Amino acid sequence: MARRMCIQFCDRTRTHLPAQIGAHTPDEMDVTLLLKSLQRTLMFERDAAQRFEGMADEEELQEVELDENGDAIDPHSAEGIKRKHRRKKREAERKALEEEMEKNGELTGDNNQGLPTIRGMISRSFDPFMTAYVALERKNMEQMINEVMSAELVDRNGQLPVFSSSVNMFAYIRNSIKRSLLATTSRETPCCLDWALDSSSSSAGNKVKLSDKQEEELCFVINTAEYCAETLPSLEEVIRAKIDKAFSEAIELSQEIDTFHDVGAAAMKCIVAGLETSLDDDLNALHKANWQTWEAVGDESLYVTQMGEKLQTFVPVLRQMLSGLYFTNFCDKFAASFVPKILQAVFKCRRMNQVATQQLLLDVYALKTLFLQLPVLNNDGFQSSFTSTSSATIPSRYTKFVSNEMATVENVLKLIGTPNEMLVESFKIMWPEGSAEDFQNIMAVKGLKKSELAAYLDTLGMQRKPTGKIAEMEGKMSDMTENWKKNMQNFAKVPFTFTGGMNTNAHQQG
């Protein structure tokens, strides 16, 4: 009987509340008062349900309560333990009452059959009015993000340094989710979460646009983006498990995860571009040297030494600050972007003599060794100081790419140093996939005249690749020729029909 009276009370209160709350517009509504009313309602429903329906152990473990300020109460705190004992006491009293009623024959198994649960009977009436609460959470999140972004600090307590704003943001979001899920399990719950993630990813993205020599901050951006992208899936699972099943499918954070990955990729692109820029002067020294008058082969050139010193200073810092995945990504992207520039620099040289090719072969070998050891480079040089248990390894795909690219440069230098009369045969053997343009570049570096080029290409069985306006004109003429051929072929497929009148006249004249 007591449970039925409680249900009757809840039903009448449920129909009475919307009229009372709806009398105020969202702007006029006192959100603090609304939340306190909802909290008291939830506490009443929980206590009533515990008294009349009982509480499963699993449900008790997951139960989270709020204090007067709306913050989640730590179950291990003094207040949390006090409330836990209070719940157990009420549960014991309920069981004792049931046993007494059953003993007196006042309780039968059919008394509670078909009765609705008390949980949510009143509190669901608050759902249509929770937009004001969401607006307040969003405002608080905005204030928190602006504060931490204005005085950005680096959190070095974890395995990798990240911006402290990301740690604070997720701590706030988790607490906000607890408050939101206690207030409502409807679609309103993740609204402020979506906004917070959009704001934080945009703020992290803006940090990519940094001035020169700020690679350390770019590493912080990458680590922060990686931390956020790895944290979001677990956050998504928590919300899906807590929210109403009707809305769980709408909780999808893949777009936000992709955004953070994009931020990390953009920061990595800046790091690679910054390192390339620092090496540009050294690479320019390669093709600006006077290779025509080179007289003797000595030690590796100064530009090679300077490249090594810069990489030796730059790379170990990145390996220490980035995760293994992102450091490997850096090595791959830097090698793919910079190593091919070495061949381009060689092709810019002019009138290179044979001694110069030997010097460049020595330089290229030193560069190849440098780039092959890039993933394990340290301040003292290569991996000689690493122990056998070092986790630094060189991926096979990286080694294969660098070896193939540098082998092409070495073959080009050998061809440049080859006597002219042996050049054609050597080109076929050493660079079988080489094109007419490649051969032209080699001839240009050797300093041969354009008038000599046609004869060599004829011997090689290739045609000289035209350049400039001539190439453009020949391309248009070729397109016109192909179009003319297609039109003639289509015309030939059309059957030719003779008119009957001409045949008739001819027959009559006959």
Image (tube, rainbow, N blue to C red):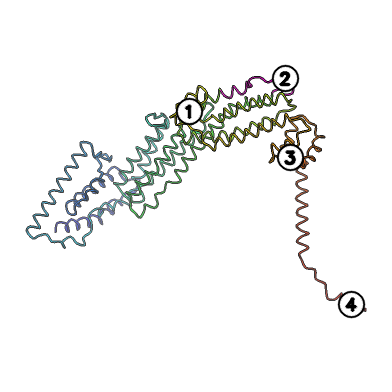
- On residue 216, the disc is 1
Q: Which residue is mark 2?
A: 295
Amino acid on which the number 4 mark rests in the picture:
Asn
Residue 457 image offset from top left, x and y in percent:
78, 39
Residue 399 image offset from top left, x and y in percent:
55, 35
Residue 302 image offset from top left, x and y in percent:
62, 20
Extreme-left residue of the structure: 104
Q: Earlier in the sequence, mark 4 or mark 1?
A: 1
Amino acid on which the number 1 mark rests in the picture:
Glu
The question of residue 296 being in magenta is answered with yes
Q: Which residue is mark 3?
A: 436
CA gap between label 1 and label 3 equals 45 Å
Residue 266 image offset from top left, x and y in percent:
52, 37
Q: Nearer the viewer, residue 141 or 259?
A: 259
Residues in magenta?
289-308
Local SS, label 4: helix
Disc nearest the viewer among 1 and 2: 2
Q: Earlier in the sequence, mark 2 or mark 4?
A: 2
- Dot 3, how many residues are within 10 Å of its Cα: few (below 14), some (14-19), or many (20+)? some
Local SS, label 2: loop
Q: Is residue 97 above or below residue 331?
A: below
- Dot 1, how many residues are within 10 Å of its Cα: few (below 14), some (14-19), or many (20+)? some
Extreme-right residue of the structure: 510
Disc nearest the viewer among 2 and 4: 2
